[in-house]
Amino acid sequence: MARQPDGPPPPPTVQKLRLRYTKRGPLRFASHRDLARALERALRRAQVPMAFSAGFSPHPKISYMGAAPTGAASEAEYVEIGLAVRCDPEAVRVALDASLPPGIDVLECVEAAEGTGGLAERLDGTRWRVDLADVDPAELSAAVDQLLAAKVAMVAKRTKNGTKDVDVRAALVSASVAGEAGRAILHVVVRQVTPTVRPDDVLAALAAVADLHPPVPPRAVREAQGRLDGTGEVTDPLEPDREAGSRCQGEPQPV
């Protein structure tokens, strides 16, 4: 018979909270693992009553969703946490935000509403802003037109299983250009596919299709991620939870 873990089982999850947070400034260079460690330390520091998994190595119930790549900033990172005690979501947001380093800012915390589906199911699109210094917006606009007109735009992408050819055009929902002379801003919406198409892949496709090669490394910011609507816009993934108007059963506890 297999040996059972000593001690009583961990308390069950009585509440799930969904949070949106940022990755700004120098922390855009932090890896996902570094950010996860920072968040877990902050949860302990803020004394958030986390629920834990069972087994010989219990760990806090935390689910990360579609983390932005290292080097990219983000205004729309999402995580779901399970609590062993019901808490006021806004109190959790304030306490956790105060315990995190500058650059990781908790913008919103809502209770997961029952019957609205999982959070990961609502993240099938991302909107990116890519700042390109020393690039003429007219040149970028012409390159974007060429990419949008292409039926296929294959680029070689490194994955954990080696290099794989990816069709960037198939994942590209929309692209537009803004800016002024000597500085261009590229806005793109991409579908969540496997492997993920990111801003550097879009720029690689622009190089392949239109021979565009920015002289200065670009700066990418994830502006939003969520479900794509019928017009190709990225919707707010927390809106179903707000609309459900989930109410705490029993008195929520302060953190």
Image (cartoon, grey):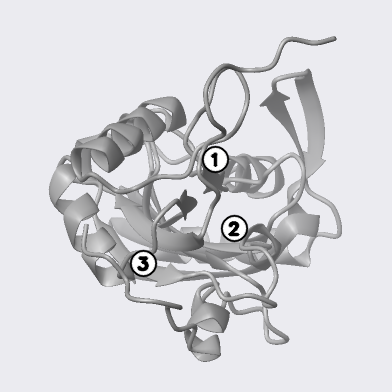
Label 1: which residue? 200
The answer to whether residue 201 of the structure is visible from this angle is yes
Kind of element beneath mark 1? helix
| Amino acid on which the number 2 mark rests in the picture | Ala
The N terminus appears in which quarter of the rendering? top right
Q: Which residue is drawn at 22% across and 57% down?
A: 255
Q: Residue at x 49, y 51 (%)?
A: 82
Camera-near label (3 vs 2) is: 3
Left-right relation of 71 to 180: right
Q: Which mark is residue 143?
A: 2
The answer to whether residue 100 of the structure is visible from this angle is no
The residue carrying pointer 2 sits among few (fewer than 14), some (14 to 19) or many (20 or more) residues within 10 Å by Cα, namely some
Q: Residue at x 47, y 44 (%)?
A: 51
First in residue order: circle 3 vs circle 1 = 3
Camera-side residue of 133 and 246: 246
First in residue order: circle 2 vs circle 1 = 2
| Amino acid on which the number 3 mark rests in the picture | Cys
Label 3: which residue? 109
Picture layout, residue 213 above or below residue 124: above
Kind of element beneath mark 2? helix
Q: In the rendering, at what x and y percent does residue 29 appear? A: 33, 31
The residue carrying pointer 1 sits among few (fewer than 14), some (14 to 19) or many (20 or more) residues within 10 Å by Cα, namely some
Q: In which quarter of the image is residue 39?
A: top left
Picture layout, residue 147 above or below residue 37: below
Kind of element beneath mark 3? strand
